[in-house]
Amino acid sequence: MTLSTIPNRILHNGVSIPQLGFGVFKVDPATAETVVADAFEAGYRHIDTATIYGNEAGVGRALAASGLRRDDVFLTTKLWNDDQGADTVEDAFAASLDRLGVDAVDLYLIHWPCPARNRYVESWRVLHSIAESGRARAIGVSNFEIEHLERLHAETGVVPAVNQIELHPYFQRRELVTYCQERGIAIQAWGPLSQGKSDLLAEPTIVDAAAQLGKTPAQVVLRWHIEQGTIVFPKTVRPERARENIALFDFELTAEQHQAVTDLERNLRLGSASTDVN
Ligand code: NAD
């Protein structure tokens, strides 16, 4: 492995996932194909999309046109809330495969638990049967709190491969992260750069570390995630930023720099809480 190679994480079922990927939340469906083609060009081999993003078809077109082998690209999509239910998940999943133009995804997630709908356990059973059929190489959840994970385990015994949650230096979710780590559930950070909704990248700790390392503030934050063992897929529609965000594997934070970023925790949630989404 050269220093610039993206490392893999091994999920609990043995499937490898590149620790760094490319997220396409809010990427316009009309430009998604170009944006993802640029990401492939920059070296990304892991794309995180979702039904609700409306851009699965663009992702699929970029994949088909890339000339890359299907098994060289790790592809994640997510079940939208309205499609939860024992009788609806199969059709929603089939429609995602169709839009993506693939026979299988690498990872399929329940996007939100939607506790008030009370359909996530029955939906999870369908995801399990999809995984058993080979049409998803791994299955997981997103925005699940400990109580939702506990219920999945108690009622189905099937442990998610990942939990994709809002996670950044201002919002580190330590109790939830520890709970997942102890059970072999890999953590994926959404909003790893805090979605541009905070002053994180202007934080003196981060700006100073970036200056010392000759890197950018975004690279310092993303490198911190990588060193935590978290799977990240920052989003950008600007090719130069896509190249910047992937250049994380030829440097390390010093122990002091890493700790200083960890010390920025302020329990600051910037997105929705799982109880607010239904
Ligand atoms: P992010 O933290 O990746 O922030 C993206 C924003 O950061 C960009 O729009 C841009 O403004 C800025 N940015 C990106 N690169 C930069 C750079 N090098 N320098 C300066 N600014 C930069 O937030 P996100 O897109 O919300 O999260 C990443 C991915 O996580 C999404 O694209 C999506 O795939 C996933 N996601 C999942 C959920 C979920 O509920 N499961 C929710 C949100 C996002």
Image (cartoon, rainbow, N blue to C red):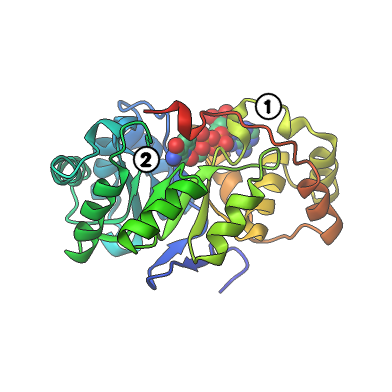
Quadrant of the image occupied by residue 31: top left
Q: Which mark is residue 240?
A: none
Image location (x, y in percent) of residue 75: 33, 52
Farthest residue toward the front?
Answer: 154
Q: Is residue 36 above or below residue 15?
A: above
Quadrant of the image occupied by residue 206: top right
Decide if ligand 1 comes within 8 Å of the CB at mark 2.
Answer: yes
| Residue position for label 2 | 111
Q: Is residue 236 above or below residue 28?
A: below
For this view, does 201 lie left or right of residue 123? right
What amino acid is at disc 2?
A: His
What amino acid is at disc 1?
A: Ser
Decide if ligand 1 comes within 8 Å of the CB at mark 1.
Answer: no
Q: CA distance from mark 1 to mark 2?
A: 24 Å
Image location (x, y in percent) of residue 9: 50, 66
Q: Is residue 69 visible?
A: no
Q: Is residue 201 above or below residue 258?
A: above
**For the residues carrying marks 1 and 2, which lies nearer the camera in this image?**
2
Count of marks placed on residues: 2
Residue drawn at x 32%, y 31% is 52
Q: Is the N terminus in the top left, top right, bottom left or bottom right quadrant?
A: bottom right
Q: Is the C terminus in the top left, top right, bottom left or bottom right quadrant?
A: top left
Q: Which mark is residue 198?
A: 1
Mark 2, other Cα within 10 Å: few <14 / some 14–19 / many ≥20 = many
Q: Secondary structure at mark 2?
A: loop
